[in-house]
Image: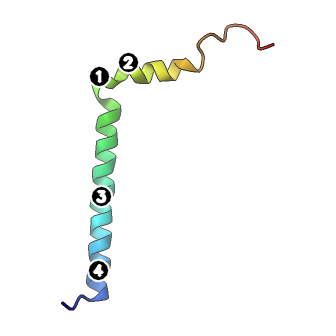
Amino acid sequence: MDVEHNTLVWFSKSFGLFYLIALSIIVLVYAYWPSNRKSFDRAATSILRDEDKPWR
């Protein structure tokens, strides 16, 4: 099996492009999935919880 360098470069660039597009879509679907909203809202406000007074 004789594979040329240009063929490997083309395949790796194409595979990398499709891999990154698919990964981006998966991350966006996960971030905007309705059942994850509660945990994301809790994480966004957790740093502010119980901090209504100055630290001593």
Q: Residue furthest top?
A: 53
Pointers 3 and 2 in contact (CB under 8 A)?
no
Per the image, the residue denoted by label 1 is 35
Per the image, the residue denoted by label 4 is 8
Q: Amino acid at mark 1?
A: Ser
Q: Earlier in the sequence, mark 3 or mark 4?
A: 4
Secondary structure of the residue carrying tag 3 is helix
Q: Amino acid at mark 2?
A: Lys
- Residue shown at 76%/11% (left/top)? 54
- Left or right: 31 in relation to 2: right
- Residue shown at 53%/18% (left/top)? 45
Q: Amino acid at mark 4?
A: Leu
Secondary structure of the residue carrying tag 2 is helix
Secondary structure of the residue carrying tag 1 is helix
How far separated are the C-alphas under marks 2 and 1?
7 Å
Per the image, the residue denoted by label 3 is 19
- Residue shown at 49%/23% (left/top)? 43
How far separated are the C-alphas under marks 1 and 4?
41 Å
Q: Is residue 44 above or below residue 27?
A: above
Q: Is residue 45 above or below residue 16?
A: above
Q: Amino acid at mark 3?
A: Tyr
Q: Is residue 37 above or below residue 32?
A: above
Q: Earlier in the sequence, mark 3 or mark 2?
A: 3
Q: Residues within 10 Å of mark 3 (few under 14, many from 20)?
A: few
- Residue shown at 77%/14% (left/top)? 55
- Could you say which disc has been placed on residue 38 in the image? 2
Question: How many numbered circles are shown?
Answer: 4
Q: Earlier in the sequence, mark 2 or mark 4?
A: 4
